[in-house]
Structure formats: C-alpha cells, structure tokens
Image (cartoon, rainbow, N blue to C red):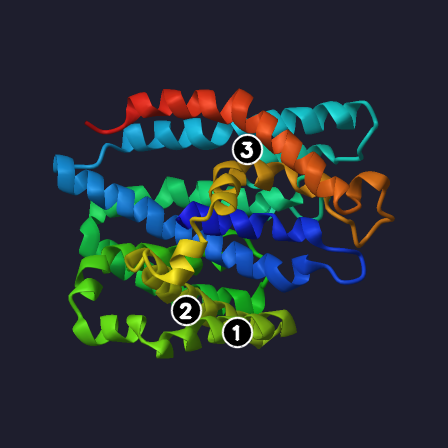
Amino acid sequence: MESHLAGSIYVLPLLGSGRFPLRFMFGNLGVRIFFVISGFLITTLLLSEREKNGHVSLKKFYVRRALRILPASYAFLSIMCLVSALGVLAIPHGSLISSFLYFRDYYPGGDWYTGHLWSLCVEEQFYLIWPIILVLFGQRRAMIVALCTLPVSDLVRSFHPNGGFETNMDALACGCLLACLWGQLGQTDRWQRFLRSPLFWVVPIAILAANKLIVAGGVWLAVGTGVANVLIAISIERFVRYHRSHAARLLNVRVALIIGTLSYSLYLWQEPFEVLTTVRPGHLQIFPINVLLASILAVISYILIERPFLRLRGRWKSA
C-alpha cells in the first residue's frame, strides 16, 4: 500500500497546466510523503531481517537496492544523454554527471529534464547512511540519531531551504522512528483509540495547513515542513496498521495497484512530459498526451528493465 500512495502522488504533476500547476499544490507534499514512507519501509525491512536472522547483511541490502534503483535510472539518463547529444533537448553536462553520480541535489541550477532526480539522490544518500548507523549503533542509539535530525533539519532549512540531504533527512527520520516505535505504539491503547477515532481526521487537515505554511516560505517553510513530516508519519501508521478501513482500501483499488507498480518508472519519465511553466509548452506536454506518453514509457521501462532486475534481486533476499 505504501508504494501505491507514493505512486499516486508521482503522477499528479502531470495533470497540471501552465496556469494552475498541481505541482505547486502537491509537489512538495508528495516528496514529503515519499521520504517518510521510504524511511519507514527501509527500516521495517532492516528490523525484520535482524529479527529473522539475528543480523542485517549490509552487502545484500546494498545489492538489492542497487538492482532496484540503478538499472531504470541509468537507462533514463542514458536516453537523456542521447537526446542531448542529438540536440533535441538542452541538458548541461553537469546535470547529467551529477545525476549519474547521485549528487544532483547539490548541483545548482541545471535543467528541467533531470531536475526531479534530486529526490532520488537524497534517497540514495539515505541508503548509504542509515543502514550503517542502525547496524553499528543498534536500534536504540540509532533512534536517538534519527530524533536529533529533526531540529537540525529545521535549523538548516531556515537558512538554506533548497539544500540537499540535510534539509530532507528529518522526513526520512520520521519514517525510521515510526518503524522503530511500531511495536510500542501498537501496545499503547490510548494512542490506538485516537487513530481509530473520527478525531484522527484532524491530522490530514493539519498536513494541508502545514503545506500552506511551506508554500509561504521563510521561517514558515522550516517549521511547516517539520510539522508536516511528523503528521505524515502519524497518517502512515493509521493507514498501514488499519489497512482494512475504507480509506486504506481506497489505496488498494486496481488503479492504485497499477500506479504503484509503475510508480518508479513514472517518476523517472514524468519530467520530460510535464507542462512547463518556465518555457513555452510543446504539443507533447499537453494533457492528456503528456500522461499517455509518460505512461507508455513507464510501462516499457518496467517490462524491459525493472521487472528482469526485480527477479534478479529476489536471489539476494535474506534467507
């Protein structure tokens, strides 16, 4: 269900128009949700492996992540290199190099077509850091590290809002903390009653309100983002723990399942077909042609690249 939610948000910017772009309404919120989900999912997998085997194999973890992420992203970047070399798109060499090496979140300026990969780079940096912290420090000390990132990220954002990993690590940390506290939260009756009660729906409303603060910028961006991350983690717990609720079932309808399956490829291929707000849009960026073309390429990417490597990744699952 987690990937279905993220996948649904990936596709929202494709529906925008130059006059009323949904990107500005949902783009930042979608990234926040994606990061919190990622922290929760990765930590849950690591803790499950430790509980099952008594240890975590970092080698297997990194091989599985590489097989999941690198083939499709490098295929996308290779095609971007080709179309750039042919003069179809103007993509600076620095954008391509920083994307290939996964530090696009620290490359200033650049281009539209690879700009969205900054979030994937933040993800990769998270993969490099968090599993090592969890293995070396243990769950309790790792939780302290994750907790310390919350005020640090807020502070950094107030001075440098468009930074890289350091301005987004608190969203990932919220997901990590949720996974670490999952069992304890499940045994707290008062908290679980709140999640099941109508009062819970104040949380999604508060997320939208915090998102309005983020759009306002300045100090509100730092505070609003931090608040939104915590509230998103609370919402994720509710929908995952009570997955048979009507709201949670909505995330598992067939359309959501399909979008969830294609979410990574949709993420990679959405940018060339979005309606551009900074340049004059061409015919390929007009809805619904943009959605159709991005979806076709996403399906091709999934069938020819993702699916074969996903089967290969299965061989590296922990025994």
Q: CA distance from mark 2 to mark 3?
A: 33 Å
Q: Position of residue 37 (x, y in %)?
A: 40, 52
Q: Marks 2 and 3: which is nearer the front?
A: 2
Quarter assignment of residue 177: bottom left
Confirm or deny contact between disc 2 and disc 1 (CB under 8 A).
Answer: yes
Q: In the drawing, does residue 145 fall left or right of residue 121?
A: left
- Disc 2: which residue: 231
**Neighbours of disc 3 within 10 Å: few (<14), some (14-19), many (20+):** few
**Quadrant in which the C terminus appears:** top left
The number of callouts visible is 3
Residue at 24% x, 74% y is: 193
First in sequence: mark 2 vs mark 3 = 3
Residue at 31% x, 76% y is: 197
- Against 44, residue 53 (above or below) is above
What mark, if any, has residue 101 been given in the picture?
3
Q: Position of residue 312 (x, y in %)?
A: 38, 20
Label 2 secondary element? helix
Label 3 secondary element? loop
First in sequence: mark 3 vs mark 1 = 3
| Three-letter residue code for mark 3 | Leu
**Neighbours of disc 1 within 10 Å: few (<14), some (14-19), many (20+):** many
Q: CA distance from mark 2 to mark 1?
A: 9 Å
Q: In the drawing, does residue 185 fall left or right of residue 264?
A: left
Residue at 77% x, 28% y is: 84
- Against 42, residue 302 (above or below) is above
Confirm or deny contact between disc 2 and disc 3 (CB under 8 A).
Answer: no
- Against 134, residue 62 (above or below) is above
